[in-house]
């Protein structure tokens, strides 16, 4: 059994300290099919963080469902898609710099590998010998 991420999406919105997030500025910056696999879910999250060059430490999941097919992660970012420095945060709070509210969505699945039953091959109507 393994855990995998098959798709990553990143959307951002302009964020000013004084006015907050501007929902009309929402745009997609990343829309990528991937195949990142790990032996545990924790290891998968670590690999995703490594892949994107960041630490994923607070997941958004729909806790009303028993199983998930995606999880989210959000953070403030600067124009280089990095976490803002302390100086950039001070400028943001002083209204001298805008930042970006970044929302990441990771499509995930648990993979269980098993052999294919001969009956399934026959049911497909394929000739065998």
Image (cartoon, grey):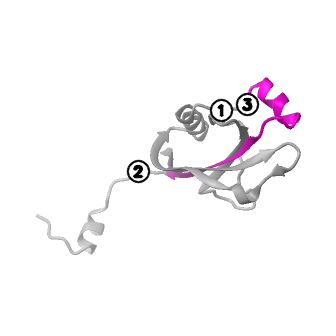
Indicate which disc residue 113 carries: 2
The picture places residue 29, in percent across and down from the top left corner, at 57, 48
Residue 56 to residue 29: above or below: above
Task: Please tell me whether mark 2 or mark 1 is closer to you in this view.
Answer: 1
For disc 3, the neighbor class at 10 Å (few under 14, some 14 to 19, many from 20) is some
Image position, residue 109 (x, y; %) = 53, 52
Q: Secondary structure at mark 1?
A: loop
Look at mark 1 in the image and give the residue it sits on.
Answer: 82
- Residue placed at 28% from the left, 68% from the top? 119
Residue 18 located left or right of residue 31: right
Callout 2 secondary element: loop
At horizontal 61% and vertical 37% (from top left) the residue drawn is 42
State yes or no: discs 3 and 1 in contact (Cβ < 8 Å).
Answer: yes
Name the side, left or right, on which 52 lies relative to 128: right
Task: Find the distance from the CA under tag 3 to the CA under tag 1.
Answer: 6 Å
User: Magenta segment range?
Assistant: 85-110
Residue 22 image point, x, y percent: 77, 54
Q: Residue furthest left?
A: 129
Nearer-the-camera pick, 28 or 127: 28
Q: Residues within 10 Å of mark 2 (few under 14, many from 20)?
A: few
Instruction: Work out how far the residue at label 3 is from the one at label 2, CA to CA, in angstroms.
Output: 42 Å
Name the residue carrying label 3.
84
Identify the secondary structure beneath mark 3.
loop
Query: Residue 65: which quarter of the image?
Result: bottom right
Where is residue 51? Give x, y as percent: 52, 34
């Amino acid at each position: 059994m393994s855990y995998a991420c098959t798709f990553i999406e990143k959307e951002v919105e302009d964020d000013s300290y004084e006015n907050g997030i501007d929902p009309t500025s929402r745009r997609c910056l990343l829309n990528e099919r991937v195949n990142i696999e790990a032996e545990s879910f924790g290891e998968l999250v670590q690999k995703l963080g490594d892949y994107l060059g960041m630490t994923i430490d607070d997941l958004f999941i729909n806790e009303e469902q028993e199983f998930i097919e995606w999880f989210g992660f959000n953070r403030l970012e600067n124009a280089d898609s990095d976490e803002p420095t302390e100086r950039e945060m001070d400028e943001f709070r002083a209204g001298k710099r805008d930042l970006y509210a970044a929302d990441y969505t990771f499509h995930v699945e648990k993979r269980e590998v098993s052999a294919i039953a001969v009956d399934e091959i026959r049911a497909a109507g394929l000739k065998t010998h």
